[in-house]
Image: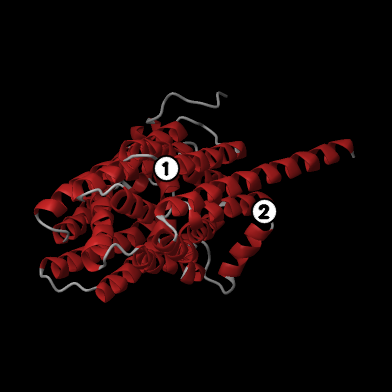
Amino acid sequence: MKPFNSAVFRSLRNFNYRLWAAGALVSNIGTWMQRTAQDWLVFVVLTPHNGSVLGTVMALQFAPHFIFLPWTGIAADRFNQRKLLMFTQGAMGGLGIALGLMTVGGIIQLWHLYVFAFLFGTITAVDAPVRQTFVSELVGESDLTNAVALNSMSFNAGRFIGPAVSGVLIASAGTGWCFLLNGFSFLGILASLFFLRKTELNLSGRASRRRGAFTEGLRYVRGRPDLQAILLMLFFIGTFGLNFPIFLSSMGIRIFHADAASYGFLSSVIATGTIAGALLNAGYERIQFRHLVVSAGMFACGCAAAALSPDYGFFAASLVVTGAAAMFFTNATNSLMQLSTAPVMRGRVMALRVAVAMGATPIGAPMTGWVADNIGPRWAMGIAALSGLAAAVAGLMVSSFNRKQSKYQDET
């Protein structure tokens, strides 16, 4: 079997996946419009370019992934995933409309944004593991790696389009309209979920309702050194490396004096890299552990180049490398963990993955924001580079240990 398959878009042969992908793309564009508008609202409108406050907003938005971990993974394993997704997607749409109305009405304050960030994070904490594991119900395990990568490609196509549109809309009409459009964009994915061919879903067994289900998931991971190694690498990069709102805001606005349109363009530039990383990932039939090590090293190189950028153009170019490496790395962790996990445990394992990747943001984002404010934005990017290096070194150590163990077992 070839390690690389040219049928990059093979999952789109499946009707249910095509329908899901179309609805998700509309929603993803709206999501990135809101993310860009939210960062601009915090960093420019509500504060005098305060990276620490932006880090606090990020912390509130991602903390629920860790706080509610005992329940989110169980929900993904136990309940009907299509119906649960319809609830979470509808709730996020409603929150977007409410935030937009308050912003357009001119009554939004910083503490309101804190509340909305936590509410969005709470719904997303339930939504994320369900949405990730639902892919296997759409396409089955044979095309899971490809579908995961195409999902990320759709997400980052939204990242490419959304911020650019948001930048123009902020300059012409204000941030509130970005929030409103994001709220209504969820109608696309709700429609796709409603019209899925239910008889063609690849339904897997649901976990039974019993006490200790969460600790059962922890024991499962504790007995899997390979999953532990992936989570450790993900912790380094997720905590200190994926704080892109802080990097783009502090570097783009404070160092290179970007306006709203130029700031939105930076988000679209990094999306170009992430789409490239997702395309590369989609071509592989099977991801290997060594791919994690290489992509973590490339992420470190991209962040280092961004930190040392002499001008806006070089910074934008370095973001392409950074985005491609980050997306390949995160997709690879997703595919490896899903394919190597028993279906009945998959929701809990993926919830733990999301908690490590996003739930650690309350640790890393405020620290990164403080460094950007008090030492300098370039130093904050330097921390991101070190996170990629730490992940690559951890991966190399695990690979070396596994080779020694394998050699010892062969000899005995």
**Residue 16 in view here:** no
Give the CA distance from mark 1 to mark 2: 36 Å
Viewer-proximal residue, 398 or 240?
A: 240
Q: Residue at x 23, y 57 (%)?
A: 37
**Residue that label 2 marks:** 224
Mark 1 secondary-structure assignment: helix
Viewport quadrant of the N terminus? top right
Q: Residue at x 37, y 31 (%)?
A: 9
Asked if 392 appears above or below 185 in the picture, the reply is: above
Rendering coords of residue 222 (x, y %): 67, 60
Left or right of 16? Residue 372 is right
Viewer-proximal residue, 365 or 253?
A: 253
**Residue that label 1 marks:** 306
Viewport quadrant of the C terminus? top right
Task: Classify residue 19 by image quadrant.
Answer: top left
Left or right of 410? Residue 184 is left
Find out whether the residues at labels 1 and 2 contact each other: C-beta distance under 8 Å. no
Asked if 287 appears above or below 136 in the picture, the reply is: above
